[in-house]
């Protein structure tokens, strides 16, 4: 089970460690538990493969780029999928639930601070825990 990585041992001032991405790449095992910030357009961030050793891990993504400037793509491994839905202006956007399909913060509608949190709940499934912004599932 994963835990958050804190930058302080002071229980009154716990700060979650931050990861920043400027190139496409995968989340490292050592960065599980960090907040993942993306300010560069067009990056694809690979989710860790879900294993029995990291089942229950949570990943938190934040779009830190300028409004309408950043397309952020979260990409599960081919044997994993993203499930769940996001309420958007009275409608629901569902993740495809198809193995290996990406979940995307759309560029034209992106806002600084859009976020999405995913949790590994089975050996093949990431579930959407919460979000802000407009997201879409890869077709």
Image: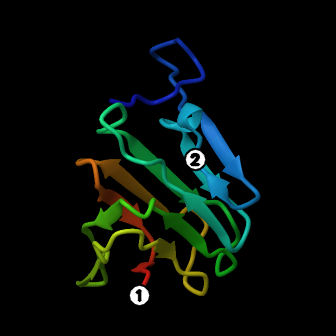
Q: Nearer the viewer, residue 18 or 112?
A: 18
Q: Nearer the viewer, residue 95 or 123?
A: 123
Crowding at dot 2, Cα within 10 Å, few <14 / some 14-19 / many 20+, comes out as: some
Q: Secondary structure at mark 1?
A: loop
For residue 129, side relative to residue 138 (left or right)? left
Q: Give the alpha-carbon distance from disc 2 to disc 1, as whole Å.
A: 23 Å
Q: Residue at x 44, y 81 (%)?
A: 138
Q: Nearer the viewer, residue 92 or 32?
A: 32
Q: Secondary structure at mark 2?
A: loop
Q: Is 10 situated above or below 40?
A: above
Q: Residue at x 28, y 72 (%)?
A: 97
Q: Is 133 situated above or below 31?
A: below
For residue 13, side relative to residue 68 (left or right)? left
x, y (%) of residue 100? 41, 69
Q: Which residue is mark 2?
A: 27
Q: Which residue is mark 1?
A: 139
x, y (%) of residue 124? 29, 55
Contact flag, marks 2 and 1 (Cβ < 8 Å): no
N-term mark: 2 or 1: 2
Residue sitting farthest toward the top: 10
x, y (%) of residue 54? 37, 35
For residue 112, which numbered disc appears in the image?
Answer: none
């Amino acid at each position: 089970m994963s835990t958050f990585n804190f930058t302080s041992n002071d229980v009154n001032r716990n700060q979650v460690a931050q990861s920043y991405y400027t190139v496409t790449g995968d989340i490292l095992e050592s960065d599980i538990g960090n907040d993942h910030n993306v300010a560069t357009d067009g990056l694809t961030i690979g989710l860790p493969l879900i294993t029995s050793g990291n089942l229950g891990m949570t990943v938190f993504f934040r779009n830190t780029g300028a409004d309408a400037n950043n397309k952020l793509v979260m990409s599960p491994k081919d044997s994993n999928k993203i499930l769940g839905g996001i309420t958007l202006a009275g409608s629901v956007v569902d993740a495809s639930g198809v193995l290996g399909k990406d979940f995307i913060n759309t560029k034209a509608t992106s806002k600084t601070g859009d976020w999405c949190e995913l949790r590994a709940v089975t050996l093949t499934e990431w579930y959407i825990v919460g979000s802000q912004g407009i997201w879409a599932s890869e077709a």
